[in-house]
Image (tube, rainbow, N blue to C red):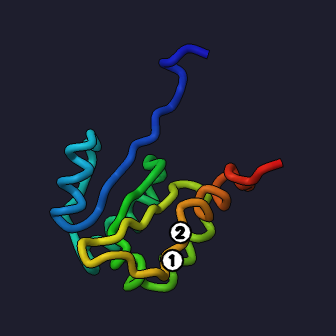
């Protein structure tokens, strides 16, 4: 299979200006500075569109998000929504990255045989 045949899925960042700036410096090209309901609506829109592979959001947003959208995120294998702690530090309620990958792939990459 040639490289042109491989579908590239994008990484999208949604959050406050600090989060967005950090990921812009890391090379992420699609980002939205948004918080609260606006950010939640953007996550829902991206999930419905289906062209994002990973959506990175502030952890605070995940905690405050409507339960119906949380259920959709939990049930979806793609995109993976990754909560990142804000400047205040981790909230502690978010699912670990290891658990999200396990849910998305169906097996634990870190498990030793």
Mark 1 packing: few (<14 Cα in 10 Å), some, or many (20+)?
some
Query: Nearest the camera: 107 or 75?
Result: 107
How many marks on residues? 2
Q: Which mark is residue 33?
A: none
The outermost residue toward the right is: 113
On screen, residue 56 above or below 24: below
- Badge 2 marks a residue whose secondary structure is helix
Mark 2 packing: few (<14 Cα in 10 Å), some, or many (20+)?
some
Image marks 1 and 2: residues in contact by CB distance under 8 Å: yes
Question: Residue 9: x percent and y percent?
Answer: 45, 40
Residue at point 49% right, 82% down? Answer: 93
Query: Nearest the camera: 106 or 92?
Result: 92
**Is 28 placed left or right of 92 in the picture?**
left
Residue at point 31% right, 56% down? Answer: 13
On screen, residue 45 above or below 38: above
- Badge 1 marks a residue whose secondary structure is helix
Q: Residue 73 carries which label?
A: 2
**Is 73 placed left or right of 13 in the picture?**
right
- Please give the residue where the numbered disc 1 appears in the rendered image: 70
Query: Nearest the camera: 78 or 91?
Result: 91
Residue 15 quadrant: bottom left
On screen, residue 90 above or below 12: below
Query: Nearest the camera: 64 or 90?
Result: 90
The span from disc 1 to disc 2 (Cα, nearest Å) is: 5 Å
Pick the quarter of the image with the N terminus: top right
Residue at point 21% right, 46% down? Answer: 24
Residue 86 quadrant: bottom left
**Is 78 placed left or right of 45 in the picture?**
right
Residue at point 34% right, 74% down? Answer: 40
């Amino acid at each position: 299979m040639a490289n042109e045949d491989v579908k590239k899925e994008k990484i999208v960042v949604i959050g406050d200006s600090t989060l967005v700036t950090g990921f812009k410096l890391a090379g992420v090209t699609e980002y939205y500075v948004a918080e609260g309901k606006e950010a939640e609506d953007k996550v829902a829109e991206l999930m419905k569109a289906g062209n994002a592979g990973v959506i990175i959001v502030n952890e605070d947003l995940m905690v405050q998000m409507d339960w119906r959208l949380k259920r959709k995120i939990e049930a979806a294998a793609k995109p993976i929504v990754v909560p990142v702690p804000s400047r205040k530090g981790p909230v502690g309620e978010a699912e670990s990255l290891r658990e999200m990958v396990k849910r998305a792939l169906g097996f634990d990459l870190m498990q030793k045989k």
